[in-house]
Amino acid sequence: MRHDGAMAALLDDDAVRTALQDLPGWDRDGDSIVRTAQLPDFVTAVGVVDRVAEDAESVQHHPDIDIRYNTLTFRLSTHSEGGLTAKDTDLAGTISQRITAAGG
């Protein structure tokens, strides 16, 4: 439920579990969801980061991203709400599409 245009409702545990069933590779870690993916090489990995950055900017919701050569770790949480919201699960789906498209 939205309280106003700027706030997103926290997902309860059942909603998070249900969402993760449709997000292979994503796991819950406290108030975040996390996915690590290995890409073919460094340039491909950075290309995924570039595309995810554009996606994130377009929805004004930004993941934490760790780059280790060709391995990327994405962490999502809605910090302003203190947990997980649909913003996180929606962006996780987009990130997964970017990873798959890049061969990860």
Image (cartoon, rainbow, N blue to C red):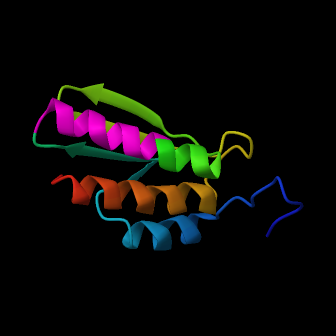
Residue located at (56% from left, 40% from top): 62
Q: Which residues are magenta?
A: 41-53
In this rendered view, identify the residue nearer to me: 102 or 76. Answer: 102
Q: Main secondary structure of the magenta part?
A: helix
Q: Which is nearer the eye, 41 or 77?
A: 41
The answer to whether 76 is drawn above or below residue 27 in the figure is above
Q: Position of residue 56 (x, y in %)?
A: 54, 46
Q: Position of residue 87 (x, y in %)?
A: 61, 57
Q: Is residue 87 left or right of residue 71?
A: right
Is residue 49 in the magenta section?
yes
Name the residue rendered at 30%, 64% in the picture: 24
Coordinates of residue 86 in the picture (x, y in percent): 61, 63
List the single residue furthest toward the top.
68
Q: Specify the farthest residue to the left.
A: 40
Residue 31 appears anywhere in the view = no
- Quadrant containing the N terminus is bottom right
**In the displayed structure, does residue 38 sit left or right of residue 14?**
left
**Picture coordinates of residue 57 (x, y %)?**
58, 43
Whether 6 is among the magenta residues is no
Q: How many marks?
A: 0
Residue 50 shows in the view: yes
Q: Which residue: 75% across, 58% down?
A: 8
Q: Residue drawn 39% across and 54% down? A: 95
